[in-house]
Amino acid sequence: MKSVLFAVATVFLGLIGPAQAQEKPPAGDAEVGAAVFKKCLACHKVGPDARNGVGPALNGVVGRPAGTNPTYRYSSAIGDSGLVWDEATLTTYLRAPRKLAPGTRMSFPGLPNDQDIADVIAYLGTFDAEGRLTPPEPQDGSTDRNGAQAQER
């Protein structure tokens, strides 16, 4: 009986072990992301004065459907993709743009470092659609930007 239980436990742990071993994506740091974003500045801009260039201005891009900046003419690879620029999709795209969207005009080969990708996404997430900086929300909702404990009123 012990050997049967051992076998069942071994199989069970073998099945759930790999799922638990998957790493959580790194948390992004917007300040570091600003430095990493310098690699993108040849084609993309953010901020209140951002304008389209070779690529679209990226104000408010995090969470927005792909290909919807009304002042930029997208390739059909992006415009017809149906993608939404959530964190997971941006992570995949920034790692290898042409892999996610074959036919995109974006010539950048991608960012190979997961932390750089998370940092750039955090940085882009600080800009609203008009390019205004928005304060980052606390990860767990328990403290404000200055580390003060949140209080209910």
Image (cartoon, helix red, strand yellow):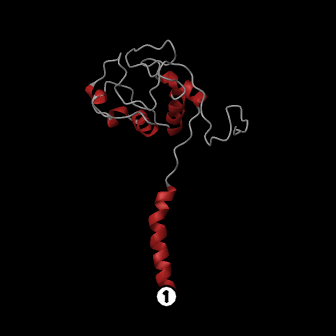
Q: Is residue 51 left or right of residue 82?
A: right
Height in image: 148 above or below 3?
above
- State the count of labels: 1
Where residue 59 appears, x then y in whole percent? Answer: 47, 22
Residue, x 60% and y 34% (percent of image)?
137
Left of 124 or right of it: where is 149? right
Q: Residues within 10 Å of mark 1 (few under 14, many from 20)?
A: few
| Quarter residue 73 falls in | top left
Q: Residue furthest front?
A: 153
Residue at the right extreme, as displayed: 148
Question: Residue 102 appears in which quarter of the rendering?
Answer: top left
- Residue at the (47%, 64%) spot, across then down: 16
Task: Say which residue appears at 49% left-offset and 74% top-offset.
Answer: 9
Q: Nearer the viewer, residue 22 or 141?
A: 141
Q: Residue at x 50, y 39 (%)?
A: 114
Above or below residue 52? Residue 4 is: below
Task: Give whichever of 47, 21 is nearer the camera.
Answer: 47
Image coordinates of residue 26 in percent, x first then y, are 55, 42
Q: Is residue 43 above or below residue 87?
A: above
Kindly state the secondary structure of the residue where label 1 is placed: loop
Q: Quadrant of the C terminus?
A: top right
Q: Position of residue 46 (x, y in %)?
A: 49, 19
Residue pointed to by mark 1: 1
* Residue sitting at the far bottom: 1
* Rendering coords of residue 76 (x, y %): 26, 27
The amino acid pointed to by label 1 is Met
Q: Quadrant of residue 150?
A: top right
Question: Vertical placement of 122 versus 51: above or below?
Answer: below
